[in-house]
Amino acid sequence: MWLTILLAILVDQLWGEPRRFHPLVGLGWWISTVERHIHDSGLSNTRALIAGLFGWCLVITPIMLAIICLDHLLEGFWHGLLAILTLYLAIGRKSLVEHAQRVYQPLLENDLDTARQQVGMLVSRDTRQLDASDISRATCESVLENGSDALFAAIFWFAVAGVPGVVLYRVVNTLDAMWGYRSERYLYFGRVAARIDDIMNWVPARLTALSYALAGWHWRTPKNFFGVAMRCWWQQGRSWKSPNAGPVMAAGAGALGIQLGGGGIYHGRHVASPVLGAGRSAEAVDIERACRLVLHALLIWLAVLFIVTWIGS
């Protein structure tokens, strides 16, 4: 297991996301097709909720039947290759870092227009009026939260349930990304998708928060942020609108010694949110620090998984 995870991470580092024929593109098409055939804006709240449950099952069932059959049919080298490729396609650390760098570089050159445009590809808030600190804050939030969703949760479910586990997680996460909005169209239709994603992310998110806190533990410097990160997690994490993003971002912000959150402009109106973390406001340099924090947390996960694999064998 440990070697498979390490190889998948190395493949991701070498190749990044496939530029063409990514399975998630096909998955997005399938989800959109199902939604188009079963969801109508005129449905009552109850019928929309039932339609969302039916649509969720319709999306999941054929994919999981196919991957479980394939997982049982392949053996030896071919099964190992399937596991490496599946996990590689499910994680996206290099892509996350590349997106963050596309914001970081224009900020260094004081090119706020480009930085706003690039951060708009990472977050759902209105970025047109953001200043440099706001852009840095939004990017750090995205790096920390997506580090949990796009990396650590996928590794967790692969470690727990192998190829079927990581495929199920990635499909559930994509369904939430497409249906899990609190808008008029998706408030009831996407509720099942959102709740199941919350359930599958509950344990990985808290392990990620712990690993962020541990990654902030600087042994030989006075800037030891482990205690700060743990305190932010416990005191601030539950106040966030998402039960999983809150602990992750609070611990990450505490480990970095910065403040995140505080709200933003969504669909033309200001939406307030709690302040997460402790210390100064986010700056451009913190984008790279957030990426390094995710990397250090990943090294902690690999070390723990190696120990668990070694003990198990």
Image (tube, helix red, strand yellow):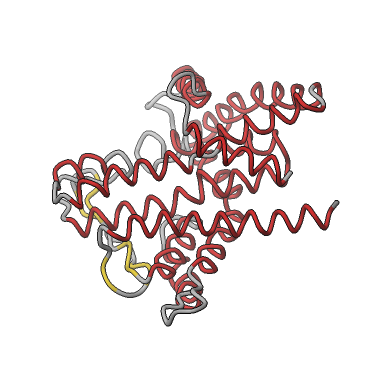
Question: Where residue 115 sits in the image (x, y, percent)?
Answer: 21, 45
Asked if residue 135 shows in the view, the reply is yes
Q: Is residue 58 above or below residue 48?
A: above
Q: Kindly identify the residue that appears in the image at 41 percent across and 54 percent down.
A: 291
Quadrant hosting residue 304: bottom right
At x 55%, y 32%, the residue is 89
- Assign the N terminus to one quadrant of the image: top right
Looking at the picture, does residue 59 appear above or below residue 11?
A: above
Up the image or down, 97 lies above or below 178; here it is: below
* Residue depicted at 56% across the width and 49% down the height: 152
The answer to whether residue 271 shows anywhere in this view is no
Q: Position of residue 26 (x, y in %)?
A: 50, 20
46 vs 73, left or right, is left
View extreme (right): residue? 313
- Image height of 4 relative to 289, above or below: above
Residue 75 position, x and y percent, is 82, 25
Q: Dividing the picture into quarters, in which one does residue 132 lie?
A: bottom left
Q: Which of these two is toward me, 186 or 246?
A: 246
- Which of 54/156 is in front? 156
Q: Position of residue 170 (x, y in %)?
A: 57, 36
158 left or right of 114?
right
User: Residue most toward the bottom?
Assistant: 222
Q: Quadrant of residue 10?
A: top right
Q: How many marks overall?
A: 0
- Residue in the image at 45% along x and 60% along y: 246
Q: 152 or 29, which is in the foreground?
A: 152
Residue 261 relative to residue 106: left or right:
right
